[in-house]
Image (tube, grey):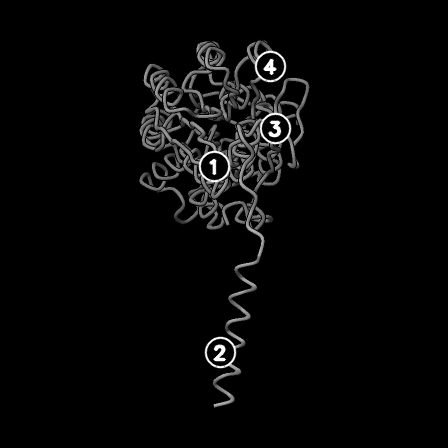
Amino acid sequence: MKKVLALLLALTLVFSLAACAPKPAAPAAGEQAAPAAETPKIGVTIYKFDDNFMSFVRRAIEKSAEGKAELILNDSQNNQATQNEQVDMMISKGVKSLAINLVDPQAAPAIITKAKAANLPVVFFNKEPNADVLKSYDKCWYVGTASAEAGVIQGKMIADAWKANAKWDKNGDGKMQYVLLKGEPGHPDAEARTKYAVEEVKNAGITVEELELQTGMWDSVKGKELVDAWLAKHGDKIEFVICNNDAMALGAVSSLKGNGYFTGDKFMPVVGVDAIPDALEQVKSGLMVGTVLNDAKNQGGATSDLAINVANGKDPLDGTQWKFDNNKAVRVPYVAVTKDNIAFAEEAYK
């Protein structure tokens, strides 16, 4: 009985103390309670979702934004009019910033006009607007690469491989007879990669002869179709296949395999740019000489970081590792990839 009384007294004391505990102060007259923190909405467009490389950039943006922002993602289906409509839609939905992978870099002023009217910051990525266009709006920045760098690196790779393999000069004329699969005409990366890759080979003292140069529009199917046609026209006169990106390089490899290459002593050197996983497998197996890592993981991460910061009213580089160059651009470096450092490139997709 004494134990029961003691327990009742203890419970009474606990309830008394709870009743006397101070309550949170109510908001003063005219004040409102602080709202729960919300993640900002960010509008994102990709020029087309089924682009091999951009699919990895998109994945990196999504991963980097997890728990930090609500993304409204759009596939512009390689149509600038569609993208313009998507920007209008995202603005109407109350996004706090825009992240735009342009279909056409020349359309940047139209996007900026829309962003300005809504007082929204905009981060362009992967397809670079003209520097003057970026400077026209104080809430506008770019994330991407230095376009010429990929061409220079690819050109050095081609020159080194050519010099190390004298048997690739099939006709023994001391010249490299090449075909080149170019990306989208007018795209800064396509123009720069085409120009600087060939220039770098020439700078290495190698005489070149261009047999074919046509656009494969970054696409593996178009790349295959073009190489099929070139092999039918030139046959073994072709000594090197240079590709502005890996998707077209994969198409070239498919065509070459279908035409009896990579069996016995029949070989054709092929190089690309992007270092996407499928291309890395071809480098491993010896069907591609090499590629150039276009760092999708860091391009997507930087785009997300900047877009989230400005959506929250912060400086775009706040708390990040990134830096701007003189053109308000974050430049993610390229890296040459061959069998020797394949593991490094694979890490970019983990």
Q: Which of the marked residues, 2 or 4, is nearer the chain's N terminus? A: 2
Q: Amino acid at mark 2?
A: Leu
For numbered disc 3, what is the local secondary structure? loop
Query: Which mark lies nearer to you, 3 or 1?
Result: 1
Please name the residue that numbered disc 4 is placed on: 138
Query: Which mark lies nearer to you, 2 or 1?
Result: 2
Please name the residue that numbered disc 2 is placed on: 8
Please name the residue that numbered disc 3 is placed on: 314
Q: Which of the marked residues, 4 or 3, is nearer the chain's N terminus? A: 4
User: Which residue is at a point 36% across and 32% down the rendered structure image?
Assistant: 49
Q: Amino acid at mark 3?
A: Lys
Please name the residue that numbered disc 1 is placed on: 38
The image shows residue 98 at horizontal and vertical percentages of: 47, 24
Q: CA distance from mark 3 to mark 1?
A: 15 Å
The image shows residue 215 at horizontal and vertical percentages of: 40, 21
The crowding category of the residue bearing disc 4, from other C-alpha atoms within 10 Å (few below 14, some 14 to 19, many at least 20), is few
For numbered disc 2, what is the local secondary structure? helix
Query: Which mark lies nearer to you, 4 or 1?
Result: 1
For numbered disc 4, what is the local secondary structure? loop
User: Which residue is at a point 53% across and 36% down the rendered structure image?
Assistant: 34
Q: Which of the marked residues, 2 or 1, is nearer the chain's N terminus? A: 2
User: Which residue is at a point 34% across and 20% down the rendered structure image?
Assistant: 89
Q: Amino acid at mark 4?
A: Asp
